[in-house]
Image (cartoon, rainbow, N blue to C red):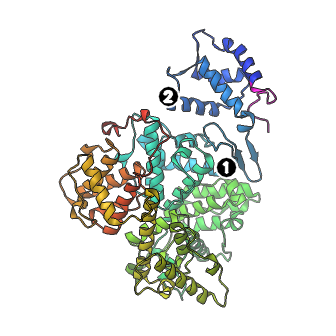
Amino acid sequence: MADIINVNQHQTTEEFKQNLEELLPNLDANKDGFIDLHELKDALNQVGFKLAGYQVREMIDEYKGKQRTAFQGKLNLEEFEALCLDLKSKDVASTFKTVVSKKENLETLGGMSSISSEGTTHSVRLEEQLAFSDWINSNLGHDKDLQHLLPIDSEGKRLYLSIKDGILLCKIINHSCPDTIDERAINKKNLTVYREFENLTLALVSSQAIGCNIVNIDAHDLAKGKPHLVLGLLWQIIRIGLFSHITLDSCPGLAGLLFDNERLEDLMKMSPEAILLRWVNHHLERAGISRRCTNFQSDIVDSEIYSHLLKQIAGNDADVNLDALRESDMQSRAEIMLQQAAKLNCRSFLTPQDVVNGVYKLNLAFVANLFNNHPGLDKPEQIEGLESIEETREEKTYRNWMNSMGVAPHVNWLYSDLADGLVIFQLFDVIKPGIVNWSRVHKRFSPLRKFMEKLENCNYAVDLGKQLKFSLVGIAGQDLNDGNATLTLALIWQLMRAYTLSILSRLANTGNPIIEKEIVQWVNNRLTEAGKQSHLRNFNDPAIADGKIVIDLIDAIKEGSINYELVRTSGTQEDNLANAKYAISMARKIGARVYALPEDITEVKPKMVMTVFACMMALDYVPNMDSVDQNNHNSSANNSN
């Protein structure tokens, strides 16, 4: 494939500059000393930069967004020369080079000016770019706040630019996990680079709160639209939304998938992927088909399983048929099968090629979407023991925290996924690097000794907790191994508390651990310095319930960030919750990595309340958005929406 840019790569920068200076007078058609941005592509073409249209549009958007020119819509000749020299110095011929491997459908993107990592090369799956763009268009195309961004083009190339102002990402998060972000916290008008950055920070920290691992991503990466990072984050968010409904709470009919010798706890131990496989096979059995599905890659490439599944879950009036199975060409067969899915309004994520290639993520998403819309399961009259195993708010918060730490395997249900100790060891290692003696840990379990090996792991985990001065009276390794809810939660809370305080102590760099009393003192000092009337006695203080202490603290940390016209004062439960939602989102918007939920504030849950204040205290030691020009900050509360 030919290079997109044809600048003479053997030319020195000095030679290139001399040639450029000779060409500049001819580029200024009306002799006013400027080049109109809508003529930028032609101008670059004349000096040897053969850029694709969308790449030039990205440059123009970048110039407009950063207000790098004093004259809107124009570049003066000095700016144009600087742009060309910048492109030349970065060896743009290789920078913009795009390589597509038909076998893997990968696009290799090197340090592209606005959409990739400098000095690195990453593979981007074009099918993901296309699938996610289509999903966004289908699910969010009606949103009036996104009319300037949607629809994304049919090839998905503008996906990365669409992410840039942060609004779309916030909306995607709320689609997957409703009410995660308070819409009042999103900057929707008068967008400057700084206000866009605030939105991206809000989205990124909120994605972490719902369980996304964002260890290697920051708001700058999203602002630049780095494809591999954007696609990775989008997949995590979409996956969480798709899987959130594969629960007994959302679909009690899942109990019907249990085998005769199984209990509800066995279903809870299964990953969402495993549940989906069992669901598919359940319908294949009901359809009288002997074939079974063991994976969402090689088993589905011939569209046979999908065809029978669609026919089985469709109502009689849907007119879904098995015509695909009469077609011998696999790609044509996949297209006919997807046409049947369209009759159920479920033609999402997949192209025929994705089916034939067995693209795991997209086939998994396709099946999850089918399940969510057409489970086809009979609701049992009564599910015994359901109340005791439904995930509580506390359990969900802990699970999201663990997953955001990047633990492996992914935690789906606390009590089964922590029973071998491996996730707990990873968390200890994050809290105090080096504390885990990994030679003592059983990472793989032998068939004959696995029960003993897992118990030994759990005993060692308790020992480590004691080394960190955890309160573990009455907690033994056997309790973790058995999935004892009360005792397991007691350990997890202390892990989360230790993590929060260890981050704070490291940032404070005083040599002494930070304790809760110091956090309360810091809160009150901050409030007093800012002239606020709020006061915090302790983390059980009933005054916390209306959210105003948290709101005042945010405004004290970042003056003018709170729009007090949005703060409710009646003290009713409804208004308190509205304040708490606003407080949580605004805290995340200024960069506080808050995992707590609004209800933790209104119900004054002291453990989670402590983490909220600790996360905001951490901001005092980490200047947020320090690399963004504060002069661009027009973030007055009156214009916050």
For residue 441, what is the image quadrant? Answer: bottom right
Inspect the image, locate mark 2, and give the three-letter code of the amino acid beneath it.
Gln
Q: Can residue 444 be found in the magenta stretch? A: no
Q: CA distance from mark 2 to mark 1?
A: 30 Å
Whether residue 11 appears in magenta in the rendering, the answer is yes
Task: Point out the tag, 2 or 1, that comes first from the N-terminus.
Answer: 2
Relative image position of residue 214 (x, y in whole percent):
53, 56
Q: Amino acid at mark 1?
A: Val
- Which of these two is toward me, 640 or 612? 612
Q: Nearer the viewer, residue 187 or 333?
A: 187
Residue displayed at 39% across by 64% down: 514
What secondary structure is the stretch in magenta mostly built from? loop
Residue named by callout 1: 124
Q: Is residue 33 above or below residue 64?
A: above
Q: Secondary structure at mark 1?
A: strand
Residue 440: x %, y % from top left: 62, 81
Helix or strand or loop: what does disc 2 sit on? Answer: loop
Res. 25 visible in picture: yes
- Front residue of 58/492: it is 492
Say whether residue 574 is left or right of residue 38.
left
The residue that mark 2 highlights is: 67
Q: Nearer the viewer, residue 539 or 605?
A: 539
Magenta stretch, residue numbers: 1-13
Q: Residue furthest top?
A: 31
